[in-house]
Image (spheres, coloured by chain):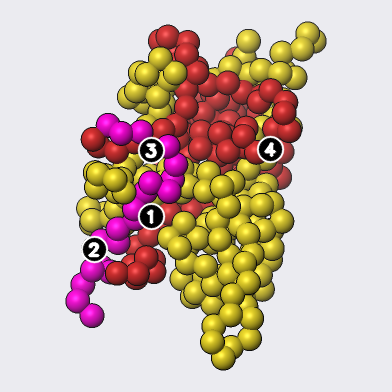
Chain colours: A red, B yellow
Amino acid sequence: MSEASWDRSQCSVAGTLAVVGEKWSLLVLREASHGVRRFADIQRYTGAPKAVLTDRLATLVEHGILRRVPYQAEGERQRHEYRLTAKGLDLVPTLVALMEWGDKYLADGEVPPMALEHRSCGAPVHLELRCDEGHELASAREIHAVPKGAALSPR
Amino acid sequence: MSEASWDRSQCSVAGTLAVVGEKWSLLVLREASHGVRRFADIQRYTGAPKAVLTDRLATLVEHGILRRVPYQAEGERQRHEYRLTAKGLDLVPTLVALMEWGDKYLADGEVPPMALEHRSCGAPVHLELRCDEGHELASAREIHAVPKGAALSPR
């Protein structure tokens, strides 16, 4: 079977991109993953135009990736902050994948600006492609993509 | 030190998004990773408007993520196809991360349309967050992000 013959309308890459596949959304998630929760801070650190940020935050809340939590600083009006849900936390590997690629190809020999450490032991954290037999894949070329479901129906 | 205090202008997430952080670019890379190489096929499978696709392919070639290779079918004029470079292949973990999230949250209980297998043993392939001590992280909450470089300068 050709690699081409599967149903793109069910593709999880496309589906995920439809929710978060946009620069500002992913930068908002970067900030959320670093514990930046308030509109003004997210705006400052991402540089997103306010109207765009309002829209992206609403979309991320609508999809259950961020949750909106009220808070009130003393003497100020009530505001909301944005926190990653478990569903949002599961997007962190995507951010790590983007970061690792950028560290490798865009850093120009400089030290990457952010290191990820394992909280409990302090060792650097990285992403691995691994199979259920426990083999680490040295390259993405070791992946065989197998279309399933709809594309396998008799035609 | 607050999680907020690091230099976003050096961020590898933002840098990578500036190159590939756009729906069509990532869908083109999805196709390339499945061995779809010709303009007409990429156009058909991604649904990208032709002008947009032309632009995105040029950007991906310019950044050395795809390379443009001439080919000539018998009796036809010479055309070009697009192949992933090693730099492009290193974006596959990003695609896998997007796919895993979509499989988990968007599949609605259906079988995901694509399975990834380890070519040599046939076992399913997945991404793992792991530290250099060999510990697998059960959750992204076990990551401690440490700003380095510019943001560490005395202020």
Mark 4 neighbour class, 10 Å CA radius: few under 14, some 14 to 19, many 20 or more: some
Q: In the image shown, does B126 or B122 lie closer to the viewer?
A: B122
Give the residue number, with chain letter if any, for mark 4. A106
- How many residues crowd around disc 1 within 10 Å: few (fewer than 14), some, or many (20 or more)? many
Task: Point out the tag, 1 or 2, that comes first from the N-terminus.
Answer: 1
Q: Quadrant of residue A98?
A: top right
Residue identified by numbered label 1 = A12
Instruction: Specify the amino acid type for callout 2.
Output: Gly
- Tell me what residue is drawn at x 58 percent, y 52 percent: B85
Residue highlighted by disc 3: A137
Would you say residue A51 is visible in this rendering?
no
Q: Secondary structure at mark 3?
A: loop
Relative image position of residue B154 (x, y in whole percent): 78, 8
Nearer-N-terminus badge (3/4): 4
**As shown in the figure, which amino acid type bears the numbered disc 4?**
Leu
* Mark positioned earlier in the residue sequence (4 or 2): 4
Residue B6 vs B107, above or below: the answer is above
The disc at residue A149 is: 2
